[in-house]
Every structure is written in structure tokens, then in C-alpha cells.
Amino acid sequence: MAIKLEAADIERLSVAERLELIERLWESLPEAILPGEIPDWHLAEIAKRRAELDANPQSGRPWREVLDQLRGKG
């Protein structure tokens, strides 16, 4: 089911309100998702990123390191 943005008036929300909406949507996802519920484009993107990382393992950084830097600890 496609949801039209106009129907939800998302464009009328402030940036802060949109971010809150994203957070609420993210938190509403179940802990486990069945394989059939994952869109093919998402699986393709994961495979692409995995191949890029395998080809150049030094290109990434651990999430905690990035998060610490964003918080001014690194």
C-alpha cells in the first residue's frame, strides 16, 4: 500500500516534527521482520554496501566512534 505524502500533510510539519515522526515510525517497527517483508531494493542496497565494504574494509568506522565524534567526545 502506497501512502501519499499529501494525505498526511507531511509538508506542513516543521523539521523537528518530521524528525519526531521518523522516530515514531522507526520505534513502531517490530523486533523481527520476515524475509518476505523486506523490499528487493533494500536487499540490493545492503548487498551493494556489503560488497563495497568487502572491497575496502578500511573505508568504514565503527558506529560508536562516529557517535562519540558527533557528541564531541572524539
Image (cartoon, rainbow, N blue to C red):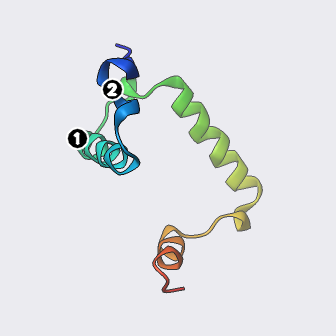
Comparing 56 with 6, the one in front is: 6
Q: Residue at x 72, y 68 (%)?
A: 58
Q: Quadrant of residue 9?
A: top left
- Residue behind mark 1: 28
Quadrant into which the C terminus falls: bottom right
- Image quarter hosting the N terminus: top left
Give the percent coordinates (x, y) of residue 55: 76, 54
In the image: residue 60, left or right of residue 41: right
Looking at the image, which residue is at 53% across and 33% down?
A: 43
Tell me residue 52's x, y (percent): 72, 49
Label 2 amino acid?
Asp
Tally of marks? 2
Mark closer to the chain start, 1 or 2: 2
Q: Secondary structure at mark 1?
A: helix
6 or 45: nearer the viewer: 6
Residue 9 numbered mark, or none? 2
Residue 2: mark in rendering = none
Evaluate if marks 1 and 2 touch, with contact meaning CB atoms under 8 Å apart: no
Residue 18 or residue 63, whichever sits in front: 18
Q: Position of residue 23 (x, y in %)?
A: 31, 48
Residue 53 left/right relative to 42: right
Tell me the mark number nearer the camera, choosing from 1 and 2. 2
Mark 2 residue element:
loop
Q: CA distance from mark 1 to mark 2?
A: 20 Å
Seen at 61% across and 69% down, the residue is 61
Outermost residue to the bottom: 73
Q: Disc 1 residue type?
A: Ser
Is 50 displayed left or right of 10 in the figure?
right
Q: Position of residue 54 (x, y in %)?
A: 70, 54
